[in-house]
Amino acid sequence: MHYSLRDAFFSRQGVTTVATISVTYFGVLATFLQVAIALWPHTAKHDTTIVTGLIAASLMGGIIHSFPRVSVTQQFKHPAFSITIVQGDILERTGNIVIGFTDTYDTDMTDGAVIHPTSVQGQFQATIYANNRTQLDHDLEQALSTIPHKDQESSSAKPRGKLTRYEIGTVAVLRRRGSIFYATAYGRMENSLRVSCSVDALWKSLTSTWESVRTHGSLEPVYIPVIGSELARVGSLGREALIKMIALSFVSSSRDAIVSRELNIVIHPKDREQINMIEIRRFLQTL
């Protein structure tokens, strides 16, 4: 919250926002004041006190309106939907949930070399599948059974993990615990076990994900983490840029055909201090 207060009141954007809103409040209150003076002329003799109070009230209005929020929501029309940026644990949500995977759909968390336990996928496997890797692999195999694979690695080239590669943007739809999980292949699992992802690959993956949600999601709320922000860093994009990219891709897809009435981009609490919610809110307002 300390970082949020700094964003709101001590950054250039924060000060500009407070000043703009305060000026708006001042204009509205000044109009009412002119009407009051016209009706009760004797109040004009207290002009210094009134103006001081007017300035104080306007500034207070600007501060209250700009006070940092834990979440930001923007409503859109034509079609009608909303985008919310919220802090929390995505695996505590129910509905349409996006989970980032690699193009090999590796699931081995034995020592963290292939899939790290602290990643969103690792937490998904531990929480939703109770670390039952056999069941998860079976469900993935079923979900991918009708999707042609792109390539096949040899065990000598890739000694650990799975060998079948799918196109970036492949989505395996898993149904578990009353939710639909969209296992989206957004990153390439190199044979060295390093995950790589480009901006183009992430955009393609997001577009494919929205198409899948449109097909299976019944317009129910969608939850997505800030994918590409951990081990598969997308170029030099930070978390704010990734959030903007996710939101922009959703809006773009929704202009073609409605995807869902509600998109929720879920920020992990440990990442909150790295995100300027004022900047995110202003960006959403431009879409």
Image: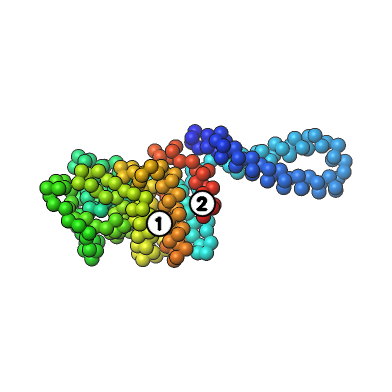
Q: Quadrant of residue 44?
A: top right
Sequence-first disc among 2 and 1: 1
CA neighbours of label 2 inside 10 A, class few (<14), some (14 to 19), many (20+): many
Of 180 and 173, nearer the camera is: 173
**Percent of width and height locating residue 143:** 24, 61
**Percent of width and height locating residue 17:** 60, 42
| Residue 131 seen in the current view | no
**Percent of width and height locating residue 254:** 45, 62
Residue on which the image places disc 2: 284
Q: Secondary structure at mark 2?
A: helix
Which residue corresponds to the image point at 82% horizontal and 37% vertical from the top-left? Answer: 47
> Is 166 placed above or below 118 here?
below
**Percent of width and height locating residue 154:** 13, 52
| Residue 86 seen in the current view | yes
Q: Tell me if 244 is positioned left or right of 159 in this view.
A: right
Label 2 – label 1 distance at C-alpha: 17 Å
| Marks 2,1: beta carbons within 8 A | no
Which residue corresponds to the image point at 47% horizontal and 51% vertical from the top-left? Answer: 84
Which residue corresponds to the image point at 74% horizontal and 37% vertical from the top-left? Answer: 53
